[in-house]
Image (spheres, rainbow, N blue to C red):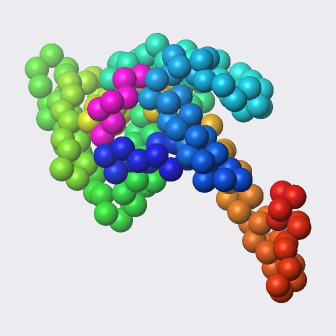
């Protein structure tokens, strides 16, 4: 697992430590520099299984994290909203019990609201039309603070979007399958079932 500023990025698995590190580095590069994806070799197998998902994420590679249209685009493409992405980020990196989110809305002139969100020691204030809009835009601002080296929404979706959840579920399922195979192993003999997997 590649960790930058205590935030987890790419995770790699392999038959050797070197192979796992290489896969983790490749995955991290894809997240941090989406343009490099075409130049990195070995991604053909994963790209074929995702199909249209990769095309949707490439559209988000053109959109900045704090773009006001992000929430609307996410709703149209069935990707998680900025607030849902923020919650997933906090859960995976800090645990839900440790971080509290506080919201504050102040009414301004001309039907505008000032929405302030506090997550731990990070504070974001945005001007918005309503509370729902403010919650999404403030979430985007907090995500930008937490990930200063990530510039596009596509990179965040690769980290915390629908595609990342599926791969997390698949990894858990693989771990359970290996656990079952371990229980069937004979003592003091190689476990050929695991070696073949």
Question: Does the magenta segment cover residue 150?
Answer: yes
**Which of the two residues, 77 or 29, is positioned nearer the viewer here?**
29
Provide residue 163's location: percent of width, then percent of height: 62, 37
Seen at 47% across and 42% down, the residue is 9
Q: In this rendering, is residue 155 above or below 182? A: above
Give me the residue at 38% from left, 19% from top.
Answer: 64
Q: Report whether 126 appears left or right of 91.
A: left
Q: Measured from the top left, where is residue 75 in percent x and y? A: 53, 27
Q: Nearer the viewer, residue 176 or 12?
A: 12
- Region of the chain picked out in magenta, as a range: 146-152
Quarter of the image where one finds residue 137: top left
Left or right for 148, reference 88: left
The residue positioned 37% from the left and 23% from the top of the image is 151
Indicate left or right for 38 with 185 as reference.
left
Q: Residue at x 29, y 32 (%)?
A: 148
Determine if residue 106 is in view: yes
Q: Is residue 131 visible?
A: no
In this view, the residue in front, 142 or 167, is 167
Dominant SS of magenta comes to loop
> Tag count in the figure?
0
Q: Foreground residue, 179 or 69?
A: 179
| Image quadrant in which you'd find residue 164 | top right
Q: Position of residue 4 (x, y in %)?
A: 36, 44
């Amino acid at each position: 697992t590649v960790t930058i500023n205590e935030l987890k990025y790419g995770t790699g698995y392999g038959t050797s430590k070197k192979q796992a590190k290489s896969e983790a580095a490749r995955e991290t590069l894809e997240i941090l520099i989406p343009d490099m994806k075409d130049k990195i070799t070995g991604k053909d197998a994963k790209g074929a299984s995702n199909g249209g998902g990769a095309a949707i994420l490439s559209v988000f590679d053109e959109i900045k994290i704090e773009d006001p249209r992000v929430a609307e685009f996410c709703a149209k493409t069935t990707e998680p909203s900025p607030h849902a992405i923020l919650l997933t980020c906090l859960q995976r990196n800090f645990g839900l019990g440790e971080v509290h989110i506080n919201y504050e809305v102040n009414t301004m002139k001309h039907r505008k609201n000032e929405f302030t969100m506090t997550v731990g020691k990070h504070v974001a204030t945005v001007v918005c039309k309503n509370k729902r809009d403010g919650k999404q835009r403030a979430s985007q601002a907090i995500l930008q603070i937490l990930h200063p080296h990530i510039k596009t929404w596509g990179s965040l979706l690769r980290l915390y979007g629908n595609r990342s959840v599926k791969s997390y579920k698949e990894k858990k399922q693989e771990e359970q399958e290996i656990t079952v195979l371990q229980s069937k192993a004979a003592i003091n003999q190689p476990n050929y079932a695991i070696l073949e997997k």
